[in-house]
């Protein structure tokens, strides 16, 4: 029998045997998200909530619009039965805060309804969570990084007790719809200075660039498994996805597409990398963030741990589906 407990003496966790039980040590994480812009953040948070390998300690918002993003995160946490978790509000931001196509999902919901703690200073919450942890924290970040930059500037020592895993960059390939072009990826180009500070900080950095995360998309029977699931968390994800799709330009010509396929689920790969690299080809590459938002491989740059190709994308998609739909029906 295998059970998970939230203790981690090393980055990858350990297995111990106690009274005949195989016990896995869960990895403590902070989840930093710009949920409410692209829909993949919503999928990624749901996936994270269903990963027993990860011990989620804090959710923080990034890329401005903190209350809007926190409302969406709180509702997903509630659907996943984790309304005990604290949510920290990131700072307002003058940069490109992105689309707000999930706004109808946030309307009518007040943060005061959330059972867990809402922390006004999400930057300080991140700092405190890292510095007070007896075990190193894994920070999973899936958006532009102004909150992360602010935390590093306020307390550089957080890099001594954390590692960073992000959905950032484009190294040799672009995303599914523009595969042959290396681009200035959105999470980097929307705040290159923040990305530079995070990439250059003295902590281990792991990234899934568009080379790998940019081709994750559920179609056909795989997507139908999520659409037809009566699991509360799956239903919350699909309600958000339907709202997001119907408020976009694509709905004008194909309003039913959300029922047939997902969008590209970039951010889910960063969650996976927090506990496993088994399905991916990893390379240690010297990567520099340029002032114009590209992630260039340059010999004199700091070496980053990069997921550059898939060993088995289908197996990852199967894992994602199984986890998101694994909670049972509404009476479970």
Image (cartoon, rainbow, N blue to C red):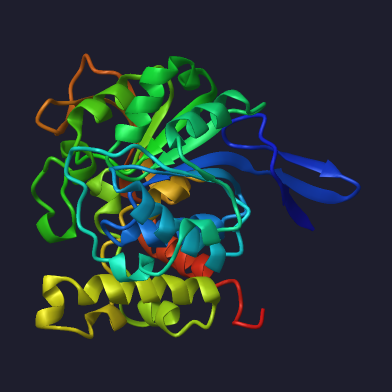
Q: Is residue 253 left or right of residue 285?
A: left
> Residue 79 lies in what quarter of the image?
bottom right
Residue at the location (43% across, 77% down)?
A: 226
> Residue 145 lies in what quarter of the image?
top left
Q: Is residue 211 left or right of residue 112?
A: left
Q: Is residue 139 above or below residue 109?
A: above
Residue at the location (42% across, 42% down)?
A: 89
Is residue 304 visible to us here? no
Of the pair 92 and 217, the residue shown nearer to us: 92
Q: Position of residue 174 (x, y in %)?
A: 16, 49
> Residue 306 lies in what quarter of the image?
top left
Locate the N terminus and report the quarter of the image it occupies.
Answer: bottom right
Q: Is residue 279 above or below residue 8?
A: below
Q: Position of residue 82 (x, y in %)?
A: 60, 58
Of the pair 40 and 252, the residue shown nearer to us: 252
How many numbered marks appear?
A: 0
Of the pair 159 and 223, the residue shown nearer to us: 159
Residue at the location (45% across, 61% down)?
A: 110
Q: Is residue 93 above or below residue 152?
A: below
Q: Position of residue 301 (x, y in %)?
A: 24, 18
Q: Position of residue 20 (x, y in %)?
A: 88, 50
Is residue 155 visible to us here? yes
Locate the C terminus and report the quarter of the image it occupies.
Answer: bottom right
Residue at the location (45% across, 37% down)?
A: 122
């Amino acid at each position: 029998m295998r059970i998970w407990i939230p203790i981690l003496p090393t980055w990858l966790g350990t297995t111990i045997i106690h009274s005949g039980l195989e016990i896995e040590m869960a990895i403590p994480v902070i989840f930093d998200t710009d949920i409410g812009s692209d829909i993949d953040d919503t999928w990624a948070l749901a996936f994270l909530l269903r990963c027993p390998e990860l011990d989620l300690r804090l959710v923080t918002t990034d890329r401005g619009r903190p209350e809007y993003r926190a409302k969406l995160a709180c509702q997903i946490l509630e659907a996943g039965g984790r309304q005990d978790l604290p949510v920290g509000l990131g700072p307002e931001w003058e940069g490109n805060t992105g689309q707000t196509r999930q706004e109808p999902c946030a309307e009518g919901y007040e943060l005061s309804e959330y059972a867990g703690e809402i922390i006004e200073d999400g930057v300080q919450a991140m700092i405190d969570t890292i510095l007070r942890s007896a075990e190193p924290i894994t920070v999973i970040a899936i958006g532009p990084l102004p909150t992360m930059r602010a935390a590093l500037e306020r307390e550089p020592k957080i890099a001594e007790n954390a590692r960073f895993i992000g959905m950032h960059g484009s190294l040799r390939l672009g995303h599914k719809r523009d595969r042959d072009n290396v681009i200035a990826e959105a999470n980097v180009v929307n705040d290159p200075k923040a990305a530079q500070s995070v990439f250059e900080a003295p902590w281990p950095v792991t990234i899934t660039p568009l080379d790998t995360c940019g081709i994750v998309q559920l179609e056909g029977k795989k997507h139908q498994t999520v659409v037809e699931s009566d699991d509360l968390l799956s239903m919350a994800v699909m309600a958000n996805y339907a709202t997001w799709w119907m408020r976009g330009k694509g709905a004008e010509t194909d309003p039913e597409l959300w029922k047939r396929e997902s969008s590209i689920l970039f951010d889910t790969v960063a969650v996976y990398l927090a506990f496993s690299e088994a399905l991916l080809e990893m390379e240690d590459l010297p990567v520099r963030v340029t002032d114009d938002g590209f992630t260039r491989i340059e010999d004199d740059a700091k070496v980053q741990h990069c997921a550059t190709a898939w060993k088995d994308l289908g197996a990852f998609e199967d894992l994602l589906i199984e986890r998101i739909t694994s909670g049972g029906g509404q009476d479970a």
